[in-house]
Structure formats: structure tokens, C-alpha cells
Amino acid sequence: MTAKRHSRKSADAATESLTPRRHARVDVADVLRGFAVLAIILLHAIEHFNFYQFPDTSGQSGWLNFTDKAIWDGLFFAFGGKAYAIFALLFGFSFFIQHDNQRMRGNDFRLRFCWRLLLLFLIGQVNAAFFTGEVLVLYALVGFVLPLVCRLSTRTVLTLAAICMAQPICIYQVIRGWIDPSYVIPDIDDAPFWAATFAVQDGGTFLETIKVNLWEGQLASLAWAWEHGRVFQTAGLFMAGMLIGRAGWFLEKNLPLWGRVLAAAIICFFPLYGLNNMAADYISNPNILTPLKIILSSLANLAFMLILVCGILFAYYRTRRLSRTLSLLIPYGRMSMTNYVTQGIIGSMIYYNWGFHLQMGITGSELIGIAIFLVQYALCRIWVNHHSHGPLEYMWKKATWIEFPFSARK
């Protein structure tokens, strides 16, 4: 009996070694996605989805003025530039999972991922038609860095990611401005694009809104991303997320490593945040100050983002009660793309002229953002009970694996 059992185990082991493996779904990654998309809707709601028109608050009560300021300042401090960074980090992580799953099957995923990025660009166009601040188009464009670097060594990719996150063009501009007082940093005149989008948000029809958003709106959004260092930072975060997947850092066994990350992030955040706020008091040359503040704010946001990620990871893996609470975000995170795109459509309908053109203060707008989240969350809970993917996630996956002569799925 013992010999037979040993023989069966050996056969099972041999069979398992011949069977292509898949990475198990990492639930904490879905928690992080859910957290990021929740934070994004809370921010976009008070921004009126890039439609910065607010009612006169001079006659409202003092406590409402207080809550308006507390909500605005608090949310931008906690999530401004950080929620997006978590989203970008997880994009690179997802690429690694997909690429490595195909590698273990003997497939080269790089060309297929390029096709996947083209599909993402089309999905981004749908989102951009309603909301000028969307990031999927940027992700689709910057994402081509991943198939270019995925076969490089970890040290090389880490170096490239660090260079991107340090904002190399801004570093050049600071040095050049310091050496040459006559140097003027290049300026992208995106004001006409923003003016055009604001005009249709305030008074345009549905078709006029889509037309302007798909041209002037996207040019304005991409110009803003370039001017604020988001292009290089996104590329760096994509590569960092890929390396997190490669090293298995989201697994519980690697939690002690996040303790070191947390310590380093806390040490770095406060000096970077303080220097960014103080820089204007000591530097008057805008051609030095502007790129320097981009460097400092970008790195400070990166440090605070890591603090948030570490906090979620420790809470999820080490505290049972908080783990149960955070697990509630898993359905919302699994449908992150669907939730992100529908947020923009709903927000546009609520605040833009083609829809309800609702005039709300910051506190009221935040309540609307919370209501959007709650409705989306309830629908997600129902959907994931019957489907493994959200609607957009499913369509993106099915379209990704359309068979082409150059690449057959094994």
C-alpha cells in the first residue's frame, strides 16, 4: 500500500511538472485596485470631472465652508497623484502575470500585449469622449515600454525605472537653468485646448462634447501629463509593478520586505514634501523652480503612495478584522476598468451641460461621489457572483485573444 501511494505521488508530481502552471490570483492586488479606483472617484467627484465650475459659497454656513476645505485639502493630500500611481503600479504587475503565464506555456506574449495596448487605446477613446482627465490613453501609449524591457535583467529594469521616476528631463532643465540664467524651459500652450473643453462642458450639446473631448480634450490631457512628469513616472511605475510581480512581493511571505519599504518611504516623504512647499521661498527663477517642483512633488507622491500600499498590505495580511474589511473591495477591484470608465460617463452626465449640469459645492459633490461608488459596488457584488470578469474586462480579454496568423494561443 505504501509503495503504491508513493508511486501515485511520483506520477502526480511528474504530471504536474509537465502541466503548464498559472499564477494564482493575488487577492491583495484586487484590494489595491479597488482602493485606487475608490480614491479616484472621490477625487474626480470634487473636481466635477475636470469641470472646475462651483457655485458661489459666500452665503453658505461656516461649517459647510470648513467641510469643503477639509474635504478638498484632505483628499488631495491623501490621494492626489497617489491613487493614480497605485493604478499604474498594478498595470505593470498585471502585465507580468499575463506575460509569465504565457511564458510557462511556451508562448511569447509581447506581440499579443502590443495588440492588447491597441485595444486599450480604443477603450480609452470611449472614456475620453466623456471625460478629459482619463488615463487609459496614456497607459496605452506608455505601455509599449513593458514588452521592450520584460526580457532584461531585474537590475537593468530597476535602473531604468529609477531613472524614469527621477524625472530625467526635469533634472536636465534644473541643471541647464542653473548654469545658464538665460535658458527658458519649453512651454506647451495647452490653454486653448482647456478653454475649448470648458466651453462645451458649460454649454455644449452631447455631440459637441464628444467631438471636443476626442481632440482638444485629449491634447490637453496628454500635454498636462507631459508637463507634470506623468509620462516618465508612469513608465517607471509600470516597470516597478512588473518587478514586484517578478519577485513575488505581493505574497504574504515577502511582507517583511515591505517593512523596509515603509521605513524608507516615511523617511523620504517628509523632507520631499517640505522641500516642495519651501522651494518657492528660495528660488525665484521659474525655469529652475518649475521642473524642480515637478521632481519633488513626483517623488513625494511616490513615497506617500508606497506608504499607502504598505499600510494596506500589512492590514490585509496581519490584522484579521481589517483583512475582512479590505476584502470587501475585491469585487470592486476585479472590475476596476469597468468601474473607472463608467465613473467618467456618469460624472460627465451629472456635471456637464449635455446632462444635468448640476451645480454642487465640494461637500455635496463628495456625497455624490460616494453614492456613485456605492451603486457601482452593489452592482459589482452581484456581477462577480455570476461572472469571473467585469463586462469591459471580459471584452478586452476576448478581443486580446483573437487569433492572428503570427500568433496562435496554446
Image: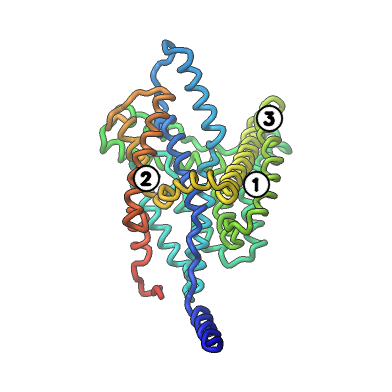
Query: Could you tell whether 151 is left or right of 329 in the image?
Result: right
How many angstroms separate mark 3 from mark 1 (CA)? 17 Å
Query: In 3D space, how far apart are the residues under numbered discs 1 and 2 (Cα atoms)?
Result: 30 Å
- Identify the mark at residue 166; answer none if there is no mark: 1
Where residue 287 sits, quadrant-wise, is top right
Amino acid type at circle 3 is Ala
| Circle 2 crowding by C-alpha within 10 Å: few under 14, some 14–19, many from 20 | many
Judge left or right: residue 93 versus residue 136: right
**Number of callouts in the render?**
3
Foreground label between 2 and 3: 2
- Label 1 vs label 2, nearer the camera: 2
Q: Position of residue 16 (x, y in %)?
A: 50, 78
Name the mark on residue 279: 3
Q: Nearer the viewer, residue 288 or 370?
A: 370
Amino acid type, mark 1: Ala
- In the rendering, at what x and y percent does residue 235 appear? 55, 52
Q: Residue shown at 47%/78% (left/top)?
A: 19
Residue 61 in percent (x, y) is at: 44, 12
Could you classify mark 1 by the number of other residues whose Cα lies within 10 Å: few (under 14), some (14-19), or many (20 or more)? many
Q: Is residue 272 shown above or below 158?
A: above
Q: Secondary structure at mark 2?
A: helix
Circle number at residue 341: 2
